[in-house]
Amino acid sequence: MSHCQQRCKRQLGRVIRFFYQFVTGTLSQDSVEDEFELSTVCHRPEGLEQLQEQTKFTRKELQVLYRGFKNECPSGIVNEENFKQIYSQFFPQGDSSTYATFLFNAFDTDHDGSVNFEDFVSGLSTILRGTIDDRLNWAFNLYDLNKDGCITKEEMLDIMKSIYDMMGKYTYPAMREEAPREHVENFFQKMDRNKDGVVTIEEFLESCQKDENIMRSMQLFDSVI
């Protein structure tokens, strides 16, 4: 692997780790040529200028991201299985497949079963450079597994179990078996304002905006790449 490819992969790894820490609430304060290099691919991304207009990335950042994306996805398109394989590299100690599926579905906004470079940078632009509301809406969409406009305890438990599986059973300190369900109960105690058993986008936004730790965590995204 060339020096450039290694650097791009490290950049993508940082993005993935920061996003993981954000959606799991563990993010803390401690915690590239003139044009795209295009080979023979199944999907050619939109022009650099158009992507600059559609996202909040600079020309140089788009070049770095594209090199990393092309290295992992030479065809220009990643399907769910490919996405799982790529994501698993960053969590080798556990099973990240279920969580990767949830994350893939959040990037696959048109639900066609694939993520191209435009989908990828559009999602990253929202996560890393969007407004606070943009980022919270993206996170809510990730948690709302059936996309019906609210988060149920069952959905949140599926998310938390997938995170437990991804972190592995041999982490230090060891994660307790009851931890996912406890996290869900804490989540709903904080977010479910009217105690009707579901969390709406309005409740989610209001609760997050009043949480200083969440607000501080999201501000750290500005310097990820």
Image (cartoon, rainbow, N blue to C red):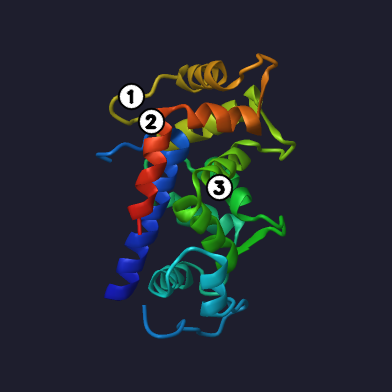
According to the picture, the residue beneath numbered tag 1 turns out to be: 174
Q: Residues within 10 Å of mark 1 (few under 14, many from 20)?
A: few
Q: Residue at image x 49%, y 23%?
A: 180
Q: Amino acid at mark 1?
A: Ala
Label 2, label 1: how many angstroms apart (C-alpha)? Answer: 24 Å
The quadrant holding residue 148 is top right
- Report if the CB atoms under discs 2 and 1 are less than 8 Å apart: no
At which x and y percent is residue 179? 45, 20
Q: Residue at image x 42%, y 36%?
A: 215
Label 2, label 3: how many angstroms apart (C-alpha)? Answer: 17 Å
Q: Secondary structure at mark 3?
A: helix
At which x and y percent is residue 168? 40, 34
According to the picture, the residue beneath numbered tag 3 turns out to be: 134
- Taking 8 as reference, is 35 left or right? right
**Quadrant of image for the N terminus:** bottom left
According to the picture, the residue beneath numbered tag 2 turns out to be: 213
Q: Residues within 10 Å of mark 2 (few under 14, many from 20)?
A: some
